Amino acid sequence: MLSKLKNKIAANRGRKNIFWQSFLAVKDTAWFFYQIIFYYLLSLRYRRIKKFQRAPKEKVKVLYLSDHPDGSITHLANIWLVDNPALDLTVKYSEREKISQKDFRDYDLVVFPIAGQYFNYLYDPRKSMVIVHDLAELYAGRENDFINRAASYERKFFLQVLRKLKNILVVSREMQKILAEQGINAHLLSTMGRFPLRDKNQIITKKCSVCSVGSESWRKNPGLLFELEKHFAGRINFNLKIGFKILDDEKYLQLIDNNEIYLCTSFVEGGPLPALEAMGRGAVVLTTPVGQMPELIVDGENGFICRNKEEFIGKIELLNADFGLLQDMRMKSRETIESRRNMGDLKREAGEFIKDCYLRS
């Protein structure tokens, strides 16, 4: 009886030893393969880093995916990318040439001029650079969603996509701050107008007239412009070109040169470019706090920030009653743009950012 019990105990010990030895063998095998995979991935990462260290590019091969009819968006490409010594630039038209992702493979970086265009492609976030102009781009152009700041499905999706991107450009601190609040990093690049500064001697104030240009889009808030025109009817001349396509630069310059005040009543903007150009030509800009305007306008010195109809009316009345003040503010408005105009610096900054994007891709 005792010998049978001893034999059972010995048999159990043998089975336990076999189980334990099998467990150790499996563990050692798993650890062996884990080390192989770990060091293989590490070597890939090391070789990738070495690749960029060995062969930095003097010129980054960039594809600018155009097709947007907005002149201000095309203007950004002209400022930052065209004739930039750091770039080997190609411009293609997505709809006209039926561009697909296969056409992106030959380029180091693909630049999408508006966020909506990138959402159509969803190309490799490491090799894409997206320009985000204003908050409305995150609402798919839906007026009610934007005005009520509704968290629509599109907005949630767009934010998720943008968080994956490494290379986002904005033109205003306002947009940079809005994206940062959503956990999205964006690089700020300065812009400038298309036209030369007006000669100081040509800025002479003998009257007070008002102009504005823009589309009929709800974003531009054209209704407020028409209300202001109606309020001042018969007293102050308003030249509003809403929904009107100015065909050439000469007519556009004539419009802003012949008016002392420029109005921007928009709900949302990136620049706006017409306001920047009006300042460079010696107009006093009265604007809502959108885009770059809070960065450029020192309220009461070189322009006015207005938040409602009553403020617009009050500031126009003030300038119409004091041509000396109007003349002084016109000169300061021009000086503001003069202090930040340097095409070479803008191209250099854009080139450095794009090279950095390439090294991080």
Image (cartoon, grey):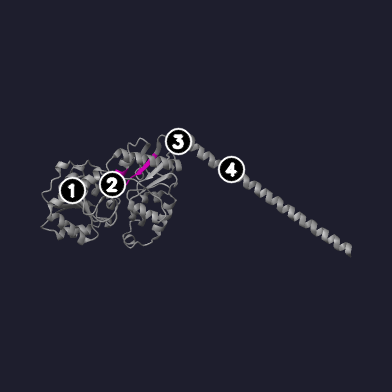
Q: Residues within 10 Å of mark 2 (few under 14, many from 20)?
A: some
How far separated are the C-alphas under marks 3 and 1?
47 Å
Indicate which disc, 4 or 2, sits on the residue closer to the N terminus. 4
Quarter of the rendering containing residue 96: top left
Q: CA distance from mark 4 to mark 3?
A: 25 Å
Residue stretch in magenta: 62-76
The x and y percentages for residue 93 are 35, 43
At label 1, which amino acid type do we have? Arg
> Reading the chain from its start, which is encountered first: label 4 or label 3?
4
Q: Is residue 17 left or right of residue 346?
A: right
Residue at 71% across, 50% down: 25
Q: Earlier in the sequence, mark 3 or mark 1?
A: 3
Q: Is residue 191 above or below residue 308?
A: above
Q: Which of the numbered marks, if any, corresponds to residue 72?
A: 2
Local secondary structure at mark 1: helix
Image position, residue 269 (x, y; %): 29, 53
Q: CA distance from mark 4 to mark 2?
A: 48 Å
Q: Is residue 64 magenta?
A: yes
Amino acid found under the numbered disc labelled 3:
Pro
Can residue 20 be seen in this snapshot?
yes
Say if 357 sits above or below 164 in the image.
above
Q: CA distance from mark 2 to mark 1?
A: 23 Å
Indicate the amino acid at tag 2.
Answer: Ser
Find residue 27 and report its horizontal and vertical position in percent.
68, 51
255 relative position to 145: left or right: left
- Residue that badge 1 annotates: 330
Residue 258 among those drawn in magenta? no
